[in-house]
């Protein structure tokens, strides 16, 4: 299975999605460090949100086979700049999380990820475990 690193802002659903991908019980916990212990590399949102720690994401992304940019369906803005995916030397996928949120706008989040250059884009609800199998299948190919 391909190793994947998840990047996105705090509260975007990265850790919850990884718990669903692992088949674990969904329990909220704040990611405090880059966890690269298995197939799914989890990163703190602060690394994406600030300028000081972004370099660490670049370094750790070299340990992965796939980069996943994560945007929640209820986010008010996208933290990633347009056309950022092509600078990676590996596939960059988009993941829209929280598609089941009451205020979800998954089409808008997908548009932002398309503008970034992500391909393909997955729509997920970790709590309902929707979209999880599609990501796992992608990582097996």
Image: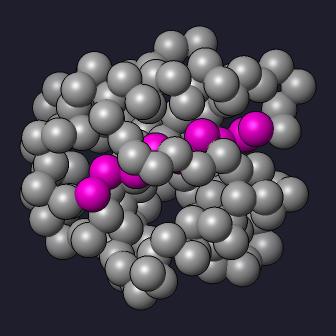
Q: Up-down: is 85 above or below 111?
A: below
Q: Is residue 75 visible?
A: no
Numbered-mark total: 0
Q: Nearer the viewer, residue 119 or 51?
A: 119
Q: Main secondary structure of the magenta part?
A: strand
Left or right of 55? Residue 66 is: right
Q: How is the image coloured?
A: one colour
Where in the figure is residue 104, as x and y percent of width and height? 77, 25
Q: Which residue does the image show at 17% across and 26% down from the upper left? A: 51
Expressed as whole percent of the image width and height from the top left, the position of residue 34 reads 33, 61
At which x and y percent is residue 125?
Answer: 76, 50
Residue 59 left/right relative to 74? left
Picture quarter containing residue 105? top right
Does the magenta-highlighted stretch encompass residue 129? no
Identify which residue is drawn at 33% across, 29% down: 116
* 33 displayed left or right of 50: right
The residue lying toward the viewer, choosing from 14 and 3, is: 3
Answer with the quarter of the image where residue 11 lies: top right
- For the magenta stretch, what is the residue range? 91-99
Residue 25 visible in this rendered orientation of the protein: yes
Instruction: Kindly indicate the quadrant of the structure image that contains residue 75.
Output: top right
In screen coordinates, is 17 left or right of 125? Answer: left
Residue 86, position as x, y percentages in the image? 17, 40
Of all residues, the one furthest to the top in this rendering is 76
Location of the C terminus by quadrant is: bottom left
């Amino acid at each position: 299975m391909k190793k994947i690193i998840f990047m996105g802002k705090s509260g975007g659903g990265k850790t919850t999605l990884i718990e669903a991908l692992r088949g674990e019980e969904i329990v909220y916990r704040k990611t405090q460090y880059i966890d690269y212990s298995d197939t799914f590399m989890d990163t703190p949102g602060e690394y994406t949100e600030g300028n000081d720690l972004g370099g660490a994401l670049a370094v750790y992304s070299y340990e992965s086979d796939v980069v996943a940019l994560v945007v929640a369906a209820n986010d008010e803005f996208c933290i990633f700049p347009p056309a950022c995916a092509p600078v990676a030397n590996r596939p960059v996928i988009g993941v829209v999380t929280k598609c089941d949120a009451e205020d979800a706008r998954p089409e808008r989040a997908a548009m932002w990820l398309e503008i970034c250059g992500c391909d393909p884009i997955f729509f997920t609800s970790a709590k309902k475990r929707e979209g999880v199998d599609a990501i796992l299948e992608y990582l097996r190919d």
